[in-house]
Amino acid sequence: MTSLLGWLDDPAESAGISFRAGDGWQRHSHRSTAEAVLRVAGGLRDAGIRSGDVVSVVLPTGHDFVVAFFGALAAGATPNPIAPPTVFAGSATYVEQTSRLLRAAGPSAVLTDADGLEPVGQACRPIGDGVPLLTVGQLRSAAPPPVRPPAAETALLQFTSGSTGDPRAVEVSRESLETNLAGIAGWLGMRPGDTTATWLPVHHDMGLIGCLLTPVVTGTSVLALSQVRFVRSPLLWLECFGVHGATLTATPSFGLAHALRYVTARPRALDGWDLSRWRSVIVGAERIAPALLRRFAAALRPWGFDEAALCPAYGLAESTLAVTGVRPGGGVRVCPAPAGPRAPAGRPVPLRATAPSAAVESPLVGCGAPLAGAEIRILDEDGRDAPEGRIGEITVSGPCVASGLRHRDGIRPVTDGDGRLRTGDAGFLRDGELFVVGRMGDALKVRGRTVFAEDVEERVADCLDPARHRVAALLGTDASGDTAVLLIEGRVDADGGTQVPWDAVSAVLRACVGAEVRRLLFHGPPGAIARTTSGKPRRRLLWQRLTGEERPDDVIAYTPDAADRVEVS
Ligand code: 1ZZ
């Protein structure tokens, strides 16, 4: 098992964490970080923090975050990362959402920085005056605790990605976290000299556990940049591999798509770089399209990128982070989806043996075999084990499944009576490998066939300009019956044009859900697709907005073709 705080006893000088600041990188060796961590731990103890207390850490990607997180752990407390006020500084929405998160977490102290004092201070008001709001700067000059306090049993309180409305904080035990860290390190074969490059938010499981904690506890290096910088220029992320020799990274599909668009538009930007040391890019957190992986690998091949570095993975905060993953060098496999819950999936084939084909309906990418002691079972509609290759609900059991969900009204178990985590995700197993199909709650049954929102999005996206448009599909049933809603976001030209090929989009939607399902098409400006802090579409909220009475003024409804019988409310 990989110890969470063991690295503090013998921190490496040669490895460290570098943050992108201005035009360069600011490096902190693990040794200097360890010193700062122990000081912050001492400062927290001086402020009255005791073993088992929760410390909410509301900071952006940066060294302060790292020392606050590990400082809370070294003080015997449970760190609870919360998104910082970078984007919505001072806005009422940020303050209100953060208040809700703080109420659910119940911290004994809140850590931020000078920029956070005002908005985070406002968010703290409802949790009472007794909870100190401290800056990491204040604590960095404290003396380390004379004796290392006992470590808390709960090593992390992390919010699930849908935690914006009704916050749910997952309690991750030390054993679960250390098992997952060791599982990730073993899966990726992490070794001295490795460097993980990351732009993922540090308050989300994949950015925090995968890209920050794993490298730190294994004594390897990190190159970290903020998500805002990545969005502005994904070249900074690619530069980590091409120029600075980074070997590992993780990203949701949209990150790969963003980098691919950038490189395609500026083919000379990578000239002189060497991507051959890049050993693994973990892709997870949302549906992975085989075509995207193929295009990404082909676009970067001239600079030495090896397709075998693509490692699709599946995981969720309720099971700490990683549940399954393809090993570096293991190769991506693609499988046609089963035609229905009772039909078995076809045989998987290697990614390179597949070609873009409109005839293949939403082929799925294999997300590898279970790791970190996870056991996966697929349950059919009657709660029985589904046979190999058949779609059912993915359930997870094992040492990384969280001990509970902290909620406004107390703590709830995350498992069912049999100790299994019901993920709400549909998928199937083939030759021991997991294929993820989509969220069960975002699907619609049409003539006995289940249509997933992810399938619709993938097929509609094929007829859109990826540099301009993004799409969210919402499927459900309301008083008007079965309904499919499409929201396409993108710029509106000066003449009011959206450049959306509405007839084609409408035809694809009809082909996906059938003519009998009510279909509503909308266009909204960039940002109209509300997302969680980890980038997933907030489908329930969008459904309420678009089918209810409170549709935002800047969202326009479309009736592309009268003959198409698209109904617009
Ligand atoms: P979250 C070096 N989902 O998204 C770094 N995977 O958690 C190692 N849907 O709780 C990092 N296909 O926010 C290892 N492949 O959401 C990282 O997301 C391994 O609906 C991947 O229920 C970790 C992702 C963590 C994450 C969980 C939900 C799931 C599912 C969806 C995750 C997916 C995927 C399709 C995948």
Image (tube, helix red, strand yellow):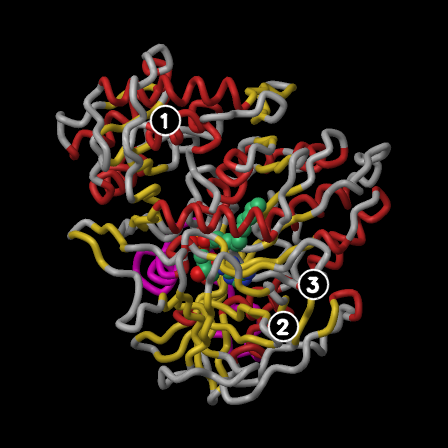
Q: Which mark is residue 71?
A: 1
- Local packing at callout 3 (Cα closer than 10 Å; few below 14, some 14-19, many 20+) is many
Q: CB under 8 Å between callouts 3 and 1? A: no
Q: Nearer the viewer, residue 347 or 535?
A: 347
- Amino acid carrying label 2: it is Ser
Residue carrying label 2: 362
- Amino acid carrying label 3: it is Val
Q: Which residues are magenta?
A: 540-569
Task: Examine the image and state in which quarter residue 422 appears.
Answer: bottom left
Query: Can you say whether 225 is above or below 477 in the image?
Result: above
- Amino acid carrying label 1: it is Gly
* Dot 2: element: loop
- Mark 3 vs 1, N-terminal side: 1
The percent coordinates of residue 376 (x first, y second) are 47, 70
* Dot 3: element: loop
- Give the number of the mark in front: 2 or 1: 1
Residue carrying label 3: 332
Q: Is residue 381 rendered to the left or right of residue 105?
A: right
Identify the residue shown where x is 24% and y is 38%: 102
Q: Nearer the viewer, residue 202 or 23?
A: 202
Residue 376 shows up from this direction: yes
Identify the residue shown where x is 27% and y is 42%: 101
